[in-house]
């Protein structure tokens, strides 16, 4: 599932996961940065 970052933030890819980073003004694309992140949907608990 694609998830948008909250207003004023973007996702940074860190290894296999993501962290949020606050934008400094307008979002400027750079290495590891994205305004959306893909997350796996888990359908049942194990």
Image: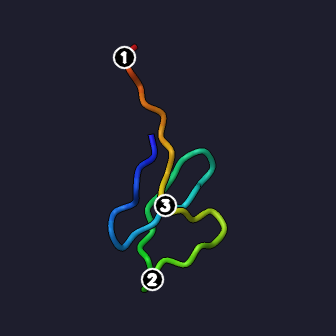
Foreground mark, 1 or 2, reads 2
Density class for disc 2 (Cα within 10 Å; few <14, some 14-19, many ≥20) is few
Task: Report if the CB atoms under discs 3 and 1 are less than 8 Å apart.
Answer: no
Q: CA distance from mark 1 to mark 2?
A: 39 Å
Secondary element at tag 2: loop
Query: Most extreme residue toward the bottom, as rendered?
Result: 25
Q: Which residue is mark 2?
A: 26
Q: CA distance from mark 3 to mark 1?
A: 26 Å
Q: CA distance from mark 3 to mark 2?
A: 14 Å
Q: Which residue is mark 3?
A: 11
Task: Residue at 40% x, 56% y: name it.
Answer: 4
Q: Earlier in the sequence, mark 3 or mark 1?
A: 3
Of residues 15 and 44, the one nearer the viewer is 44
* Left or right side of 15 for 44: left
Of residues 35 and 13, the one nearer the viewer is 35
Query: Most extreme residue toward the right, as rendered?
Result: 31
Across and down, in percent, residue 31 comes to: 66, 67
Secondary element at tag 1: loop
Label at residue 44: 1
């Amino acid at each position: 599932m694609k998830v948008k970052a909250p207003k004023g933030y973007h996702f940074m890819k860190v290894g296999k996961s993501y962290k949020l980073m606050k934008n400094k003004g307008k979002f400027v694309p750079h290495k590891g940065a994205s305004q959306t992140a893909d997350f796996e949907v888990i359908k049942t608990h194990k």
